[in-house]
Image: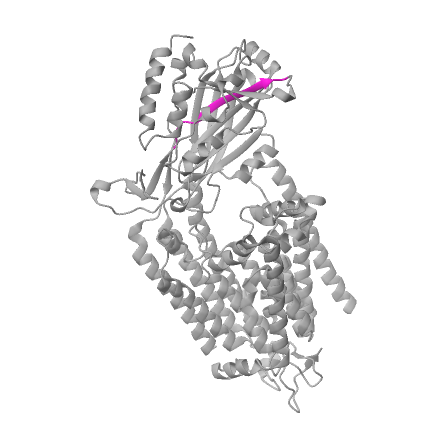
Amino acid sequence: MASAAAVTLRRVLLASAALRLGLVVFGEWQDAHLEVRYTDVDYLVFSDAAASVAAGGSPFARATYRYSPLLAYLLLPNSLLHAAWGKLLFSASDLLVGLFIDTILKLRGVPEKMRMWSVIAWLFNPFTFTIGTRGNCEPIVCAVMLWTLICLMKGRVMQAAFWYGLIVHFRIYPIIYAIPFVIVLGKSYAGVSGRPTLTIWRSEQHLQNGKGSQREGPTSFLATLWDFLSNFITRKAILFGLLSGSMFFAWTGVFFYLYGWDFLNEALLYHLTRTDPRHNFSIYFYHIYLHHQQGFSSIQRLASFLPQLIVQLALITRFSSDLPFCMFLQTVAFVAFNKVMTAQYFVWFFCLLPLILPWSSMKLKWKGLACMLVWMGTQLHWLIWAYLLEFKGRNVFVQLWVAGLVFLAANTFVMLMVIKHHKYTPLFLSSVKPGSKVATKKE
Amino acid sequence: MAVAGRPCLLAVALAAAWISAASSSPDQVADCLLGSASFNHCTAQAGTSQKSINCMPCSRTYVGDAYLNALTDHHAHHRDLSEMSDSTELCKGITDDVEVPALSELRRQLVGEGSHRRLVYSLKFGACQDAMVNFLDGHDAHLVIVEKLPNGVFADPFELQHFVERKVFLDVAVFGDTNLELPSALSNRSAVEIHFDLKPSTSINFDIVIDLPLHARYPVRSYKLPWIFNNLVIDSGEVMVQPLDASGYAAIEFDSPDLFLRYRKKEIQSDSCLWVLKNLEAAPVEKAAWRIPCGDEAHIGFVSSITFLSALVCSMSIVLATLIF
C-alpha cells in the first residue's frame, strides 16, 4: 500500500517534471524564434542582475530589479552555465511545493487518494506551471512557506523561525502570517512530550455524526485576543519572534552594508510604498492614476489601508488556530485588497489551497465549479477590457475599473463560500480529553 | 557647391536670432547649423556640404547624447551636433574625393494600435547600385537614425538590446528618461539612436526598412481649464500643447528624425581612427500622430468614493462571514 502510494506520487511528480521541462525547452525555442517571448520580463531582470553580480557589480545596477540580492546570487549560474538555470530552479521549487503539500497532508492523516488530488490541484494548475517555467521566482517563496509550516508541525520552532525570517526578507508579504504563527506557538502548542500534537483528518461522515468529535468552532474574539496577549510570554513564541526578526534584520543589514540605499529603496521601501497608476487587477488603479499627479492625502491613504487591516485582523482572530486555513484566507484577502494586483500574486494562495481542500465540504459539482467559474470569468472579463485599452487604444478606463470592482466582488464571494463550507479544525490539539475517540498524531 | 552661400547664411542668421528665444527646439538648431532642412536645397549647394559633415573619433560611439541636455532641461543652452565633433579640421582630407551616397526617399509611419506601436522607416538611397557597392566596399558605413521621442512615449532599452542580439540593429541607445514605469506627468523626454549596418547585401537597391518599437506612457489626465487655456496642459511649469478631443484622448506628435551616414575607410590606422558623420538632410517627414487614451478629471469624485465604498463593503462582508459561519 505504501509502495503503491509512493509510486503514484512519484508518477505525478515525474509527469509534472516532464511537463515543466518541456515548457522550459519550448520557452527557449519561442524566445529565439518568435517575436512574442514566452519568458517573463522579470526573468530578464533577474538574469541581468545576476550577470551584474557575476561581473563584480551590484544587482541594482539593473533597472527595475526590486528583489533581494539573494535571488541574483541564486541565478549566478544563468551567466556561468546556461540562461535557463533559473527556470529549472523555479520549476524544481514547483515540484518541491507538490512534495510538501503531500507531506503536510500525510502528517495530518489525509488518505492517499485525497492527497493525490490536492497535489494535482497544485502541480497541474495552469497558473503554477506557467509561472515557474516563464521564469517567475514565486515558487521559491511558496516552497519555503510550506517548509516553514512543516517545521512548525514537527515542533522544529527554531528551524521554522530561520526560514520564516529569511523568506520575509526575500519577499515581504509573508509578514502577514507573523501574528497567526505567534498565536499557534502559544501555551497550547506543545503537548505533554514538549512536541506539538496535530489533529488528523476525519471523514466527513464521522464529523456529521458528531460523535466523539473534538472539533471546535472558531474561537471568540475576546478569547483569541487573550490567547494572543498571553502567548507573547511563552518561550517558543518569544524565541520564534526573536530568531525570525534577527534573520530578517541580519540579511537586511548585510545587504545594506554591501549595496547601501540602492538595496533598501529598491528591495524593501519600494514594495512598502508602491502605488502603480498603470492598469492592474486592483480596484485602486484608476483612483491612483487620477490622483498620482497631485499625490494622496492622509485620509486617502488610511481609507485604502483600512479594509485590508480590518479583514486581516478579523481572519486572524477567528481562524488562526486552523493555521493553513487562516493563511489561505489571509493571502486571498491580502492580494484582493492590495493597491496593486498582478497575476503572479495568485500563486501565493494557490500553494495553500490544497492544504484546506480535505476539510472543505464544498463539492466540485456544482459549488466548487461555480466558484472557479466566477473567479476565472470575472478575471477574463477584466482581461478583455484591459486588452481593449492596451492593445486597441480605446478609452475604457471606467469599464476596466468596474471590471476590477467585479473581480473584487468575485474574490469576496469565493472567500465567503470557502469560509462557509470549511470544517474548522485547529492544526494543533491543545489537550486530549479522557475517553475521547479523536485520533491524534504526535510528532 | 558655392551657390548656396547667401540663402543659407540668411537662414543661419535667422536661426541665430531664433535660438536666443526660449522656445527654440534642438532639431531646428541642428538642421540649420548643419544645413537646411530641405535636402533639395542643400545637397546641391556647395556652401552647405561642409556644414553637413562632421568627424568624430572612433572612441565616441553615439551622436544622440548631444540631445540629452536639450531634452531634459528646457532652459539649458541648446547643444547641437556641431558641438560633438572637435572641429571640421578633423575632416580635412578624409572626405575629399569620396562620393557619399545621398538619401533619395524617406518615409516614416506609425503603425499598430494601442499602447505598443512601431515607427517604421523606409529609406532609399539615390546613388546608383554600382556607386553604392563601391562606396560600401571601401568603407564601413552605418545609417544612424536619431529619433527624439515626444513626452508620453518611450522606448524600452532592454527590448531594443534584444534587437541588437538578433542582429537586426548594429547598435542602439536610449538617452534621457529611461524609467519605463513613470506616467507622462512624472517623466521626461528621451531620444533613441539606432545604428544600422549598411552592407552590399543589406537589400536590393538599398531599400531599407527599420522598425522601432515604442510604448505609450499613461498621459496626463485631462484638465478642466478656462476656455483661453483650451487644449493646453500645464506640465512642469511649462505650457505644453496637448490637444485633447472630447472623447478623452491625448494626441502626441513626433518631430522629424535626424538621419546620418557614419562611415570610415576600411583600412583604419589605429592612431587616427575617425568616423565621418554626414547629415543625410532628409526632408521633413509627415508628422506621425498617436492618440493615447487618458483618464478624465470628471471621474475623480465618483471613482474614489465608489472604490473606497466597495472595499469597505467587501471587507465588512468577510468580517460578517467570520462571525456567522
Residues A134 and A373: in front is A134
Q: Quadrant of residue A174?
A: bottom right
Q: Is residue B295 above or below residue B99?
A: below
Q: Residue most toward the right? A: A3
Percent coordinates x, y for residue B297 in the rendering: 30, 51
Residue A114 visible within the image: no
Identify the coloring. Answer: one colour
Q: Is residue A423 left or right of residue A443?
A: left
Residue sitting at x 62%, y 53%:
A132
Query: Magenta span has B194?
Result: no
Magenta part of the chain:
B254-266
Percent coordinates x, y for residue B306 in the rendering: 34, 61
Quadrant in which the C terminus of chain A appears: bottom right
Query: Magenta span has B265?
Result: yes
Residues B152 and B91: in front is B91
Percent coordinates x, y for residue A281 in the rendering: 46, 55
Percent coordinates x, y for residue B160 in the rendering: 54, 36
Q: Is residue A334 above or below residue B60?
A: below
Quadrant in which the N terminus of chain A appears: bottom right
Q: Quadrant of residue A328?
A: bottom right
Q: Quadrant of residue B282?
A: top left
